[in-house]
Every structure is written in structure tokens, then in C-alpha cells.
Amino acid sequence: MTDAAHTLATPVPVPRTQTLSLGNARLFWVVLLLALVPIWFSAHLPAVDLAEHAAQVSALKQVLAGNEAFTHLFEIHWFTPYLVGYLLLYLLSLLLPIQVATQVLVSFAVIALPLSTGALLRAAGADERWKWLTIPGSYSFAFYWGFLTFMVAVPISLFFLVLTWWFVRQPTLRNGVLVALASLLLFFCHFLAFCGASLFALGIVAGSNYRNLKALIVRSLPYAAPLPLVASWAVSTANHDGKVQASDFVFGGVGQKFAQFLAQPAGFDYISSWLTPIVTLTVALFPLIGGAKLSRRPERWLPVLLAVIVFLALPSSNFHTGFIYERMGIFIAPLWLMAWDPAPNRRWEKIDGLAMGVILLWLFINVGRYAAFAREVESFDRALAAAVPGKKMGTMTNGDGSPLFVPPIYHHFPAWYQAEHGGIVDFNFGDFFPQVVRYRADAPARIDQAVASDLREFRWDRHGGDNYDYFMIRSEIDVCVAVFNERCAQLALVTHEGTWWLYRNTGRPQ
């Protein structure tokens, strides 16, 4: 029996379960379900890109249904490594309203992170109970930025590592084929998650077989199955997408990386909360305080070392993709916990209350923030309800932040009109290469990302102002004249709710 097989075959002793113990499965499920409560305070979450992803699925349904308002503007691109998340949301939206379907899928991603972490720890021979420590981190950087397809891909990536442990334990042809198929699936979940999970899996394989070069090469082959797909997609995208060709390389400052490194396990949108270092230190030090020791087996600690190197080495932006290293930080905590051998003399019952107390404190503060946000977003809901469904809306922001969150969470909020009311909103993600629904090459002029970010860039003729039935602007003051100049005279104010201004273009037929 190999060393890795021995690790997997040896059961990890679990201490006697008490009510206030991390070994209490019922209590774990109670806290895990309570962690989902903030997601359901409001139909619209404080997640930057989430509305755009929901709008993509709405557009997909309209194109598939043959709606000419959509088919003459959009086309479907099935060959994208972001397909799985969109298909899951599409299937849910056939049964549920799109905003509810989005909440369900986000809830799945949040709840699946601790569960997949527990499965990974169990497969590796670490202490499965430490999955508790990843509950806060399920509200990751990707959560607050609304990277829905990436969020869905993360737990799938961790289960992919579980499959790698099975393959290391029993490197049969059947298990190799399963790894290859899972690797292909992961490519269609999310490209960044696929790259990270493949690297971490190869760390497990290399750590288990570094003494046998032949075995190392043979057992790495299943992970090469998606390479033709990767090459085809990357070359096609690089050659045919002008935004990718012109994209900038942004590495990110050292201080910024350090701040994100601390914030990732804590479940807050940045390091601004006083609770952030407390949660992160609890995750980092809990195994050590409990008497655990870092494993001497390289297959256990090599993946987390690779995860840290990836986090520090990757840029923040490249290939017309932003926040690259930031979102990869979600893997560090599960892999860190995997690197520890459980303590032979269990001291967990004495310190379980510490971890549970920190997690419950995090939950209490999170509930408060999201309850306040639910009240804050009511004005947007009223403004959105005032627009007639099925129209075309141009949107711009003169300030897209909230005092409750650091990211610009309102930046894409008007895209909920496209998602919920069957209209078309510009700017929307149809301009981006990874999306399943994209603008056709012959689509008319429209509001682009630059205008959506800075309304001073808007020009009526250049951005197709005559094509819009509505304009929605977020601003503290009325900026109609400043933005539209003499065209403001043909815009009728439909409603003003809080910081949201909805105008109707009287030059368009109703």
C-alpha cells in the first residue's frame, strides 16, 4: 500500500460529540443554513456582476424563443468555459422567477463550499470538522463582486480534488477516465477555477509520486485531457476579440495583495471590518492551537503552497479579465486546513467554542449589514417597477457605491430590468467574450462600458440615444441636462426614487 493510500485508508478519530462541538453534525447544518439568511433579505443582492449574469440567462431564453427584438441583436456562443453556471441558472429559471433562481444558485455556492471542504478534508486524512472554518469564507471576494459562474465552479473544483485523492489511492484506468471527464467538465465551469484546481490536483499527484518519475508522468496524463479545448478557445478568443487584444496587464500592489490575503477567509468584502483579522487568524491558527501538526506528506501541503504562490504571482487583470488573483484566494483556506494532521491527543472540545463564537459573531454582523441593505434597495425596486416591461433601457451611474459595502455594488443593478422584465439594458455583458449571449457584429451603436461607468462620456448620436425607450441614472441630483443637453427636453421624468432617476424617451413609440 502506498503512503497516500495509507493516509486515505486510515480513519481519522473523532472526539465524543457534545452539543457545543464542531463534531455536532446537526449544529453544523443549523449554522450553515443560518449563513444563507442574508441572501434572502432582498431579491437583489449586493453583488456587482450578479444582475448581468441574470440578464444573460434572460437574453438566452429570449433568443431561444425566437424573440426578434433579441435575435437581431444577439447570438449564442455555446463554446465558452463559463457554460455550466449559466445552464444551471437557466434550468432553475424555468421553474422559478429569475431573481429567486439566482438566489437559489448563490445559496448553493455558499453552502457547497464548507460541504466540499469537508469532503476534501475527509479524503485527504485531515480533520473533517474544520469545514466549519470555511463558512465565513463562502462570502468570498467572488460573492461580493457577483462572479456567479466562478462561485459555482469553486465547490466543483474542490470535489475535483476529492476525485484526485481517489485516483492517487487507486490509479486505475477507470479512475483516470473519471478524472479526465471531470477535468473537461471543470473547463466548462470556469477557466480560472479549472486552471487553479488542475494545478492543485497535480500538486497532490506530484507529492504522492515524486519518487517515481514514470508513475508521475502516467498519472498526470488524465489532467491533460482538456488541453485541446483550452488551446482552441484561447487562440480563437485572442485572434477574434479586439478587447482581449488591447487588454492591459495590471499586477496589483503588494499592499493590496496583503489586504486581500487577510480578507479572503473572513467573509467580508475587504479588510475594512475590525472582525476581518479575527476571523482570518481563527482560520489560520485553529489547527495549531488544537495541537495539530503540519503533515510531512508533500501531497498534503504542496497544494496550499501552490495556492499561495498563485495568489502572489498572478496579476489582477489580463486577457480582458479583471480580479484574477483576488478571486483565487478562496482556495487558500480549504487547502490550508488540508495540510494539517489531526492531533493525536484531542484538545478540540476546549477550543471548539472559540471557533463557533467567532463564526456566530461573523454571522450576526453579516445579518445586520444585509438587513440594512434590504431597506436601502427598496428605492431601486420602486423605480424599476415604474418601467413598462419589454422595452430598451440605457443606464448610467453617477456614483455606484453603498455605505454598507466596499465594492461598487450598484454598478450593474439596472440590468435587473433585462433579467426580470424582458427588456434590453445597455450596458450589458453581451459585449464581453466569455458570455454565452453576445452582441452580433452588426448590432447598432449603444451605451458601452465606458459610458456606464462615467456618464460624462455619453453622446446621444454616438451611443444610439434614439434607440432607447428609457434611461435610468443613479445620482444624488438630477443630471438630465448635464448628460443629455438639449435632448433632455424630450425626456419625461417617470419617477425619482432615492438616488434612482427613470426617464422616458418621448420620441419613441409607446
Image (tube, rainbow, N blue to C red):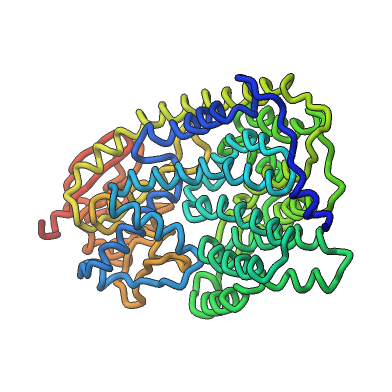
**Residue located at (60% from left, 62% from top):** 194
Of 377 and 501, the residue lying toward us? 377
Q: Quadrant of residue 499?
A: top left
| Residue 456 visible | no
Q: At which x and y percent is residue 220?
A: 73, 69
Q: Residue furthest right?
A: 211
Vertical placement of 179 versus 351: above or below? below
**Residue located at (24% from left, 56% from top):** 423
Q: Residue furthest left?
A: 510
**Residue located at (67% from left, 35% from top):** 130
Left or right for 18, reference 269: right
Q: At which x and y percent is residue 91?
A: 34, 56
Q: How many marks?
A: 0
| Residue 36 visible | yes
Of 285 and 425, the residue lying toward us? 285
Left or right for 45, reference 420: right
Of 427 and 111, the residue lying toward us? 111
Left or right for 407, reference 174: left
